[in-house]
Image: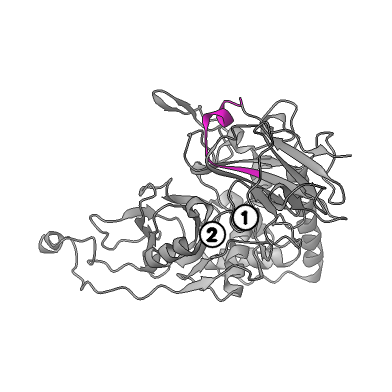
């Protein structure tokens, strides 16, 4: 399961390629993402933007729009740099230079946030937020006007003439960059899910052959080499090895599914006696050390644990795309926070043929907005039902916002058909014969979430 992280990024790359998106091009979900996209626990709340970069010919410039939140990952799912609100530009719109390993050429003196990658295959992604929950059109226009991907020209923008005169840099002609190519993702069928059959190893071989031999440390590369996947050599297992490896990937998939669908570590659960969980608070984004405490004097990191929590890492890469320190922090009003629920209040699996409800008490701790989104346990993607967007939330585009109850709380129902008297905004459709799980997202979370004075109800069966 250690190589799942690399195969997950490769599956993303191939999913984008299936829509015609090549390296250094951009995919935009102008009408939000929906269940047509097989994409690990994506949201249907924001305008998703993503692409892949190829650094084999040198550094690449990536410009991002204002009010953007995203990150850059390498082909082994390692964090490179945050973009937008959590990154150096802090949401004002940024210009980033992603530099490949071993690059010895001229770098700009200013004007860019520079990030050095360990390998040449890069995935970047992020999201832009609807303005007051309205039509995404104006935000999409800003994305297309402000997002740019193009090769870096040494000695051009970012290099003052004085550097050239001092002999420290060449000098290039400053000219307009080539136009960035955009593709539309909304409503398009795409599959970015890592496979659980023989093609898993074919994708893994693709990653190993494309990236430098030193792209990961020798120890994790050792088991990969032991099954015949070695940089510069053909991957040609005999029939016996194919049978063994096909069985192995099926068992690994079952193990990862079990870790995700039935967490055993009590520290993963966010509240006492609750099914809501988020293991990143205990493991951090590197799956080693709990996330820092935030004090009046600043962040207080915990000492290193000295070990990596492999179960948490396997569960994460099985179910989620993208890792960054910004996903695991206790800062109020910044980024977003997540809670997952896979069981009901009686610790039973969630059944798509039944009716459930969850109550969000008054004062939902989200300065921006909140949402509940339902997912398919098999694909870990949005549940495919006649509802295009399988979620309820506080914003009203394109479906109605959830209406609060008389006491200020908000009740959301999960059922194959809307319960009597329940409007679309407070109902998420499920499918008889299929299980499901749900993610609560709080955008710009507030202190009552972190101090746990606010707590959602469990997922309660409705008779």
On screen, 345 above or below 131?
A: above
Q: Which of 449 and 203 is in front in this view?
A: 449
Q: What element carries label 2?
A: strand
- For label 1, the residue is 42
- Few, some or many C-alpha atoms within 10 Å of disc 1 (few <14, some 14-19, many ≥20)? many
Residue receiving disc 2: 48
- Give the image location of residue 6, x and y in percent: 60, 57
Q: Do the residues labelled 1 and 2 touch (CB within 8 Å)?
A: yes
The mark found on residue 104 in the picture is: none
Q: In which quarter of the image is residue 267?
A: top right
When asked about the image quadrant of residue 364, the answer is top right
Is 403 contained in the magenta span? no
Residue 170 position in % (x across, y down): 19, 67
Dot 1 or dot 2, earlier in sequence: 1
Badge 1 marks a residue whose secondary structure is: loop
Closer to us: 341 or 202? 341
Residues shaded magenta:
440-453
Residue 149 higher or lower than 341, as above or below: below
Instruction: Give me the residue at 47% from left, 37% from top.
Output: 333
Give the position of the C terminus as an image quadrant: top right
Residue 401 visible here: yes
The residue sitting at the top extreme is 296
- Residue 448 counted in the magenta span: yes
x and y percent of residue 251 in the render? 80, 53
Front one among 313 and 246: 313
| Residue located at (53% from left, 51% from top) | 217
């Amino acid at each position: 399961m250690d190589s799942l992280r690399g195969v997950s990024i490769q599956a993303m790359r191939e999913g984008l390629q299936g829509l015609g998106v090549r390296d250094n091009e951009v995919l935009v979900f102008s009408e939000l993402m929906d269940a047509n996209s097989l994409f690990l626990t994506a949201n249907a709340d924001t305008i998703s933007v993503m692409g892949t970069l190829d650094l084999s010919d040198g550094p690449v410039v990536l410009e991002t729009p204002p009010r953007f939140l995203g990150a850059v990952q390498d082909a082994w799912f390692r964090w490179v740099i945050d973009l937008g609100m959590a990154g150096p530009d802090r949401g004002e719109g940024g210009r980033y230079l992603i530099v490949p390993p071993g690059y010895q050429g001229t770098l700009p003196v200013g004007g860019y946030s520079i990030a050095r990658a360990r390998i040449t295959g890069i995935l970047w992604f992020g999201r832009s937020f609807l303005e007051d929950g309205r039509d995404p059109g104006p935000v999409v226009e800003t994305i297309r006007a402000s997002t740019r991907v193009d090769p870096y020209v040494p000695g051009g923008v970012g290099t003052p003439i004085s550097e050239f005169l001092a002999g420290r840099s060449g000098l290039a002609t400053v000219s307009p960059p080539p136009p960035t190519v955009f593709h539309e993702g909304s409503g398009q069928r795409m599959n970015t899910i890592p496979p659980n059959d023989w093609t898993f190893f074919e994708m893994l071989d693709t990653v190993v052959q494309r990236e430098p031999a030193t792209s990961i440390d020798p120890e994790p590369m050792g088991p990969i080499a032991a099954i015949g996947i070695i940089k510069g050599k053909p991957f040609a297992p005999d029939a016996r090895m194919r049978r063994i490896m096909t069985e192995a990937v099926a068992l690994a998939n079952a193990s990862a599914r079990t870790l995700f669908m039935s967490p055993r570590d009590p520290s993963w659960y966010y509240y006492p006696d609750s099914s809501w969980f988020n293991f990143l608070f205990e493991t951090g984004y590197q799956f080693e050390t709990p996330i820092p405490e935030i004090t009046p004097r600043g962040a207080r990191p915990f000492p290193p644990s000295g070990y990596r929590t492999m179960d948490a890492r396997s569960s994460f890469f099985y179910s989620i795309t993208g890792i960054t320190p910004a996903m695991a922090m206790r800062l109020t009003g910044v980024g977003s926070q997540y809670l997952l629920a896979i069981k009901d209040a009686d610790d039973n699996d969630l059944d798509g043929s039944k009716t459930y409800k969850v109550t969000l008490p008054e004062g939902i701790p989200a300065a921006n907005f909140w949402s509940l989104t339902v997912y398919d346990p098999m694909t870990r993607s949005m549940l495919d039902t006649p509802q295009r967007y399988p979620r309820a939330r506080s914003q009203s585009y394109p479906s109605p916002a959830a209406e609060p109850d008389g006491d200020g709380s908000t009740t959301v129902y999960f059922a194959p058909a809307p319960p009597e008297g329940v409007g679309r905004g407070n109902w998420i459709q499920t499918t008889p014969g299929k299980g499901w799980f749900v993610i609560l997202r709080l955008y710009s979370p507030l202190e009552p979430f972190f101090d746990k004075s606010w707590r959602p109800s469990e997922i309660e069966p409705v008779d």
